[in-house]
Amino acid sequence: MKLKALYLMLSSVFSLVVLLPNVLAENRQLASPEERVKMATYLKDFYKGVKITDQFTENGKLISCIDIGTQPSLNHPDLRNHIVQRKPSPALMKIFDKQIASLGLSKEDVSFPIPKCSENSVPIRLHTLEDVVRFKTLREFQSKPSFSSIESNVRRSGPTTLHQYAAIRQHVSATASQSTINIWAPAVERNNEFSLSQIWLSRGSGTNLETVETGWQVYQGRNGDNLPHFFIYYTSDGYDTTGCYDLTCTGFIQTDTSIVIGMQLPSSVSGGTQQEGTVAYWRDPTTGHWWLAVGEGVDRILVGYYPTSLFDTNGLENFASRITYGGEIINQNVGGQHTATDMGSGAFPAAGHSQAAYQRSLQYMDISQNILDVTPGTTIVDDSLCYDIAHDSNTAWGRHFYYGGTGYNNPDCE
């Protein structure tokens, strides 16, 4: 896996400052003055006890190195006595070693990432009130937009659906999922819309749906720019009240000193240089924790994990029952017109390499610890005139697909 896309953003400019919420930040779209107080109170309580050991700036964002034992996720009620697992169990490391050997690689080939924080601290962006008040509510800041459409509480396929997809899915009992994802900076029409490419591992349905997700996303409302950012997401109740993006709620425990979750990524150039990165979740067979990895083989970096205690036996505690790969956009359907937000590169799959976005080398691990190529049984496309997907398999890229589209392109997608 190529890690270039994850390290071009390294900055050598360090500045130690005291991080305080910006209590003067304004946003006229807040649900109420009371919601503003709720946001400020949440941030104060969420970051209580965090010990900052150093700080630096990266692409204009202040990043804090915090003592690994004081990260906010450890305040989760189910994690109060949790002992941070600094690395996967020997059982999972054995699986990694077997995979490395199958690729004909040696541990001596590893290229170590540059640490951004000291050994016992992790790099985290601590959000301020100014970040949060871009949203109507605290929950809206943390979560994906509601899955109901603008006009109705019933999801409909077609161009009026709020969330639209071009994705493939396999129904299988899986304990890991991996993809090498092509990175782009698609045009997004409104700051409350997004465009992303990711992998999902999920199990359950309705309010019992549990997922872990990761990939890149362009979301001006969250990130303050129109560039791709590395993100993670989880929910344990169907996106209802639990779960969040990145590290904005208790859940994910970071262990790596070099990766900043939420960091800006370089994007591909149409007809030119293609940027890509490999992402994966691996369930530790000993502890049950879901480890997030970037890179593969000897270049694999284990960023941290979602503890198994976040999930239950009907969800992701033991395995995922669905693995999904693809693109997603938000269509606010303002004035009854489909958004012009691009998915992927903005090109449809037929445009091919260096023009259309792709994911490649799609693999998963089954419950018997066999690592296999994905064999999709379901294609998820809300409206192929807006966004589409085409998958294939060959010896060079294994299971792969091209996907994307331009959104509103009257008279086809309207």
Image (cartoon, rainbow, N blue to C red):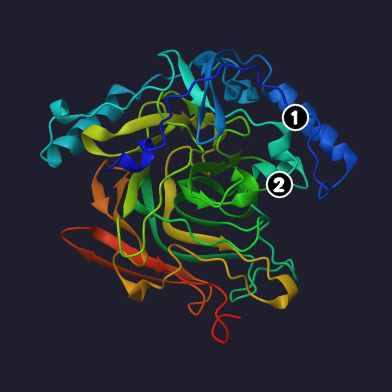
Note whether 308 is above or below 163 in the view shown: above
In primary-sequence order, the first of circles 2 and 1 is 1
The amino acid at mark 1 is Asn
The image position of residue 129, as x and y in percent, is 73, 33
| Towards the viewer: 406 or 86 | 406
| Towards the viewer: 252 or 230 | 230
Give the number of the mark in front: 2 or 1: 1
Q: Which mark is residue 132?
A: none
Badge 2 crowding class, 10 Å Cα cut-off, few under 14, some 14 to 19, many 20 or more, is: some
Residue under numbered circle 2: 140
| Towards the viewer: 207 or 398 | 398
Picture quadrant where residue 80 is located: top right
Q: Which mark is residue 22?
A: 1
Q: Residue at x 55, y 34 (%)?
A: 60
The image position of residue 144, as x and y in percent, is 63, 50
Badge 1 crowding class, 10 Å Cα cut-off, few under 14, some 14 to 19, many 20 or more, is: few
Helix, strand or loop at label 2? It is: helix
Is residue 362 found left or right of 344 in the rendered image?
left
Note whether residue 179 is visible. no
